[in-house]
């Protein structure tokens, strides 16, 4: 064998092996990056395909989820509104989170595009992102008046539904300014107003106890006073007059009750009105009406609890918008001629 040729062949073989080895090392070093890149493309593509918000996501839209609605119906509703791409995936995500039992009903605001996972979380957490509704209930309004305000601001609550929950608590729905979530229902609103009444009147509990009147009577009297007078001074005088009339066995003859009886804002009843057969008619029935004729504010409750003691038995509001008092019916008639004609 030719030693030179053999040596040359060996060198060539070693060189080829080295090149192959180096190539394999280079390939092996780049394989993980290639796989990672491919995997990243797959994940991004899968995310965009399955979980990312649709291209026509309706930013600024509000979607209402009804109480008791099933997860499949909710997923279909959101897909129809172009908030998600695949309702089946949302159903699966909700199932993992506890199913439709965990979904919080209410109105959800979608200001900017959100992925499916964020939407699923919001449904379970009740993250509505809708600013609360501000509603003011003036003093003296009835549950019926309150229902009209509620329906106007929260259309998902019907007037009849609110009235069925609120009317049993007429007089105890504290008039105030409230902030309610869009998801609020009639029950939660009534409970909030009732709790506010309890909190506001709690400091008066000992005074009610020593007043000689029940809280119920105080509230009924306050509801009459709320409609009959405006200033705290006049409210206390009118409360004193009405308590005087009850003590003497005289009918209260409060015109404001006819607004409650006829469900209208009237303070000038006709002669026919004065004869209406109603337990709230303070012309034909002595004593307090069977219940409040509205929801009084704290001033009127305080006036009913701390009336001004006078000998007055009569009062009226004249055309001068001032209240005028009398101790006798003759004096009252003179005030009528002087201030109402």
Image (tube, helix red, strand yellow):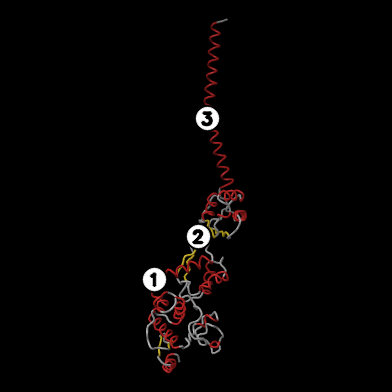
Alpha carbon distance from label 2 to label 3: 51 Å
Residue 130, disc: 2
Q: Secondary structure at mark 1?
A: helix
Q: Earlier in the sequence, mark 3 or mark 1?
A: 3
Residue 30, disc: 3
Residue 203, disc: 1
Q: Earlier in the sequence, mark 2 or mark 3?
A: 3
Q: Is residue 318 above or below residue 181?
A: below
Q: Name the front one of labels 1 and 2.
A: 1
Front residue (pair 16, 249): 249
Q: Earlier in the sequence, mark 1 or mark 2?
A: 2
Alpha carbon distance from label 3 to label 1: 79 Å
Query: What residue do we see at 58% from left, 71% from top?
Result: 160
Q: Percent x, y for residue 221?
A: 45, 80
Other residues around mark 3 within 10 Å, as few (<14) / some (14–19) / many (≥20): few
For residue 35, which quarter of the picture? top right
For residue 229, which quarter of the picture? bottom left
Q: Name the front one of labels 3 and 1.
A: 1
């Amino acid at each position: 064998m030719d030693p030179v040729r053999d040596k040359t062949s060996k060198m060539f073989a070693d060189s080829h092996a080295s090149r192959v080895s180096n190539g394999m090392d280079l390939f092996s070093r780049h394989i993980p990056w290639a796989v990672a890149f491919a995997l990243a493309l797959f994940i991004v593509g899968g995310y965009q395909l399955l979980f990312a918000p649709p291209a026509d996501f309706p930013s600024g839209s509000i979607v209402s989820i009804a109480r008791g609605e099933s997860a499949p119906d909710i997923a279909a509703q959101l897909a129809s509104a172009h908030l998600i791409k695949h309702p089946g995936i949302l159903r699966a995500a909700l199932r993992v989170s506890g199913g439709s039992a965990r979904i919080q009903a209410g109105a959800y605001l979608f200001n900017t595009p959100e992925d499916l996972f964020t939407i699923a979380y919001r449904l379970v957490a009740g993250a509505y992102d809708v600013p609360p509704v501000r509603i003011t209930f003036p003093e003296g309004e009835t549950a019926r008046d309150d229902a009209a305000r509620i329906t106007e601001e929260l259309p998902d609550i019907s007037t009849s539904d609110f009235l069925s929950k609120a009317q049993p608590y007429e007089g105890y729905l504290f008039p105030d300014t409230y902030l309610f979530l869009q998801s609020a229902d009639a029950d939660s609103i009534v409970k909030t107003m009732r709790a506010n009444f309890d909190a506001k009147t709690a400091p008066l509990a000992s005074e009610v106890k020593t007043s000689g009147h029940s809280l119920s009577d105080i509230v009924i009297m306050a509801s009459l006073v709320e409609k009959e007078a405006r200033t705290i001074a006049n409210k206390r005088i009118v409360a004193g007059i009405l308590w005087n009339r009850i003590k003497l066995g005289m009918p209260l003859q409060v015109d404001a009750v006819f607004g409650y009886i006829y469900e209208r804002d009237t303070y000038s009843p006709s002669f026919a009105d004065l004869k209406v057969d109603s337990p709230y008619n303070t012309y034909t029935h002595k004593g307090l009406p069977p219940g409040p004729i509205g929801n009084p504010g704290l001033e009127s409750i305080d006036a009913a609890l701390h009336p001004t003691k006078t000998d007055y038995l009569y009062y009226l509001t004249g055309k001068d918008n001032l209240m005028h008092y009398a101790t006798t019916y003759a004096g009252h008639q003179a005030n009528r001629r002087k201030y109402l004609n």
